[in-house]
Amino acid sequence: MNKDIERKVIAILEILNNYNEPVGANTISEKLLEKGIELSDRAVRYHLKIMDERGLTKVVGKKGRLITEKGREEIKKALIADKLGFIISKIENLAYQVTLDRSTGKGKVILNLSIIPKKDLQKSLNIMKDILKKGYGISEKIIIFDKKEEEIIPGVIVPEKSVILGTVCSVTIHGVLIKNGIPVNAKFAGVLEVKDHEPTRFLEAITYNGSTLDPLEIFIKSKMTSISSVVKKKEGRVLATFREIPNSAREDAQNIIEELKEIDIKGKIYLGKPNQELFGVPVTQGTSALVIVGGLNPIAGIIEADIEAENKAMSILYNYEDLKPIKDYI
């Protein structure tokens, strides 16, 4: 099978993997277009026939196709060369779709989604509240999806006895800046050392260009954070992202960041001096560093408390005005 067909097969499998019910060719065609792949319904059915023969999908009457376990394994084995650059492309595509108006507090923001057991919800919210209050997140506004919300957000599937927590992703700020004409270069995500509530240096980093997975998810799974220690003892390790902006845009960026605080996007954001390193990381000549404390820190705190959580960073676009302050859920 040639690489072009293989890429289309993987793209279809990734779409099917987001559903727990049969999906038809029309829906698949629409979702492929969002990925930049234009296939007619007829062409989709042709590819599905090949996938059925390979055991990657199975027909469910006239309702459509379901992905098989073999199909899920195929996704995991997808060509690494095709995956490289996926994260940075995802950041850029989602950032462009941010429509948040900093003067009204309305518009689309990017959410991280985290699945947790419903029995641990209140404990999780209390942990998150303390972390967000200290500024180790993007906003104190969140959303909780329960079973009844499945119809509202396509692709959001709430497992039995679980809920999904939606928290604002740091790429939202990236999006607001580029919408206001400020070029932003996302460099890496890392683990930032904190002492007396002040960042000192990056301890670990994974570049976006060189990763096929979201770096913050990797750090969380590897249990490399100690956000609970930062909240209680003022020192430890938190998640953060590192970006660069042109020196000429630095003042405008600072003004936008200040304005965002008025609509409760007031997590810890650090803007470096022109051409100078920040937290031990040098910048490209002609730029200033922009370090944003990661939106997944509250979830890292939950995992540190031995609560199970499955995370999907940069997951969906959602209306910021429909989020609620975390205190309203407690």
Image: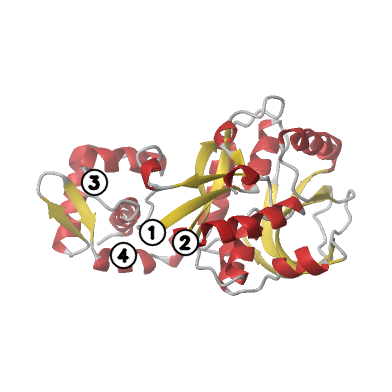
Marks 2 and 3: CB-CB under 8 Å? no
| Residue 12 at x, y percent in the picture | 30, 51
Marks 4 and 2: CB-CB under 8 Å? no
Marks 4 and 1: CB-CB under 8 Å? no
- CA–CA distance between discs 1 and 3? 24 Å
Is residue 36 at least partly visible in the picture?
A: no
Is residue 308 at least partly visible in the picture?
A: yes
Residue type beneath disc 4: Arg
- Secondary structure category for the residue under label 3: loop
Q: Earlier in the sequence, mark 1 or mark 3?
A: 3
Residue shown at 55% from the left, 60% from the top = 214
- CA–CA distance between discs 2 and 3? 31 Å
Q: Which of marks 4 and 1 is nearer the N terminus?
A: 4
For residue 108, side relative to residue 244 (left or right) = left
For residue 291, side relative to residue 9 (left or right) = right
Residue 58 found in image quarter: bottom left
**Can you identify the residue that label 3 sits on?**
23
- CA–CA distance between discs 4 and 1? 23 Å
| Residue 130 at x, y percent in the picture | 71, 56
**Can you identify the residue that label 1 sits on?**
161
